[in-house]
Image (cartoon, rainbow, N blue to C red):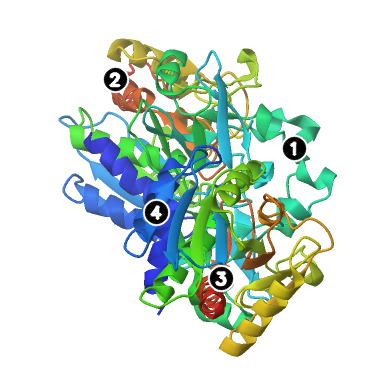
Amino acid sequence: MAELELLKKLSEARGISGREDEVREIILDEIRPLADKIEITPLGNIIALKKGKERAPKKLMISAHMDEAGLMVTHITDEGLLNFVPVGEIDRRVLPGKSVTVGENVRGVIGLKPIHLLKKDEMSKSIPLSKLYIDIGAASREEAEKAVKPGDEVTFDSVFDASGKAIKGRALGGRAGCAILIGMMRHGLKYDAVFAFTVQEETGLCGSETAAYGVHPAAAIVVDATAAADVPGVSRERQACRLGEGPVVPFMDKRTIYDRAYYDMAFRAAEKAGVKCQAKQDIAGGNDAGAIHVSREGVRTAAVSLPCRYLHSAVGVISREDFYAAIKLIEGLAEMIEEERSDRHTLC
Amino acid sequence: MNEKLRETVFRLCMADGTSGDETGARETAAREFAPFAETSSDTLGNLTAEIGDMGSKTHILVDAHLDQIGLIVTGIDKSGFINVDGCGGMDRRVLPGSAVTVYGKEKLYGVVCFMPPHFTGSKEDEVQEAGRMTVDIGCTCEEAKRLVKPGDRILFSTEPKALLGGRISAPALDNRSSVAALVRCVQILSGKRLSCHVTFLCSTREEVGGQGAVTGAYIANPTAAIAVDVGFASQPGVRPEQCGKLGGGPMIGFAPVLNRAMSEKLVSVAEKLGIPYSRDAMGGDTGTNSENIAASRAGVPTGLVSIPERNMHTPAEIVDLQDVENTAQLIAEYIAEAE
């Protein structure tokens, strides 16, 4: 349960790409008593060394990203309404009517023309981004300017619910990953490991790129969420992965072809730990592995993702069972990576 | 200054009351009226609160509908997703990816499903009808069937909030902001000697046809009526001649079905009070309970007062608290002056 409480705290924290401060503070508070060394990099990544019972034969970096996709204010209109752009990937179809928080703590909503005044063909059309705006209740530009400014971050108002088997919440992609890493640090490790909590994943992997350069690991495990399309209207073979079927291990996505031995190892780790595990049955998306596996001379990289429905929206859904299974799987995978006898890349 | 009023509006907005299932909202509203008036309810679930001289020949009915738009459960599919349809004029464009509360055997939290973008092909611009949408409560089919039944209602899980400058946002401001204006009106009139009989009617099912107002007006059998609802406030995409303005005061209706003398009287009361107001002229149907009430029994002279609202029928509805207060002041003064 401690992990779920932490996940709630992390999910409710506001932190679009480049503005991860609130999330970073929560993580630092959690890991200070757990880590043997903590460093914050110039771009804001947290690099934490956690010693295990034994020294690690190879340097392993386990990472998760702290940031979330959101919006940013670009302009204030004469009427006091706010124009915005997405930061990271947001599905524009989920935007109309949502409640948001702007800047420090200004509440707002994304407005839209009332249904009563629409032409018939407008009713069934999603609204283009250029027509959406945020209404903070300002009566004029002057009133709005006293409260917000261009460049202010915008996050969706959080709804977190873990009362059932599914967990619903905001920013689950990165934050569930962060909670898993902290969970591992709490449990204690067999071998030393470096935990990286990265910034700016949603906008182009700058955080992980620089973290990997600084840490210079020999191996990496990236922990994130991946889109589950097991919703009505999508045939089973196109669903990529399904909630409740265990953590997802990809062999390839849009950014990375994963280390084949580690891919196989992940399934063995799941079996050994007695948890479910599924292959990502689609080549889509990408994560911090895209930057990490090409760092310096190259890093052997695996990814373990949580299946998440409605990934690029205000509220995602993950499975509680998958979440706990991921912690066990990654702990096992980390040990197997360290204990791998023949490292084919060092043989040549 | 409007802090107490804001709390009243928020309490009313947090109550659940989808059309035909208004119990939660009715109980909440009844608690607000109780210190000031006798309340009762009827066959279709309307709430009435009466004040004034019960023997008076003048009997004014003040109506605000109690219900709100939402979704209704139509079935549960084999994977445990809940099939739904709109209950009232739901704007389907705000549904995908919305956090919702299912009022089943217990309160359940869910999300309105949508397909990832790369599955919609060229149809990304299309928003399917509410009747084809599903809600994800993260349950298996068996669990879902145990907890949720067809006919259960679903509302947005969006909490009321204060925006800048006395504006507030919440789902159900249509029409709980008007219910709050009625509560405020009773507060203002409390302790005053009235020479007329007043029935405040919080009517059910307006969003699906106004059946509550039909029977409520029949039961009350008033000599005059004022309907209170929300009206369009200026915002992008809405033409100035179609709307009032947030903070612009109550919109006093002028329409074929509305009694011209009552409309003008409301204007003169607003002038006398020195509150802002606008004349809201409509050529046809007002889209409110006015039509139902005016045609009750042998006919009832009816006026309409609307609170300007942005983003109507979405979880992002916005009103200005001062408009709610001024609406209450206007109606209270109209009643106080009635002989």
On whether disc 4 and disc 2 are found on a single subunit, the reply is no
Question: Residue B124 got which mark?
Answer: 1
**What is the quadrant of residue A166 in the picture?**
top left
Identify the amino acid type marked 2. Answer: Glu
**Discs 3/2, front:** 3
Q: Residues within 10 Å of mark 2 (few under 14, many from 20)?
A: some
- Quadrant hosting residue A176: top left
Q: Secondary structure at mark 3?
A: loop
Kindly identify which residue carries mark 4: B39
Q: Nearer the viewer, residue A291 or A135?
A: A135
The chain to which mark 3 is attached is A
Residue at mark 2: chain: A
Asked if badge 4 and badge 1 are on a common chain, one would say yes
Kindly check if marks 1 and 3 are in contact, taking CB atoms under 8 A apart as contact: no
Q: Are marks 3 and 2 on the same chain?
A: yes
Dot placed on the residue nearer the N-terminal end, 4 or 1: 4
Check disc 2 and report the residue beneath it: A339
Q: Amino acid at mark 1?
A: Glu
CA gap, disc 1 to disc 3? 30 Å
Q: Chain of mark 1?
A: B
Q: Are marks 4 and 1 in contact (CB under 8 Å)?
A: no
Q: Identity of the amino acid at label 3? A: Gly
Q: Residues within 10 Å of mark 4 (few under 14, many from 20)?
A: some
Q: Which mark is residue A137?
A: 3
Indicate the secondary structure of the residue bearing disc 4. strand
At 84% across and 44% down in the image, what residue appears?
A121
Q: Position of residue A146 (x, y in %)?
A: 52, 81
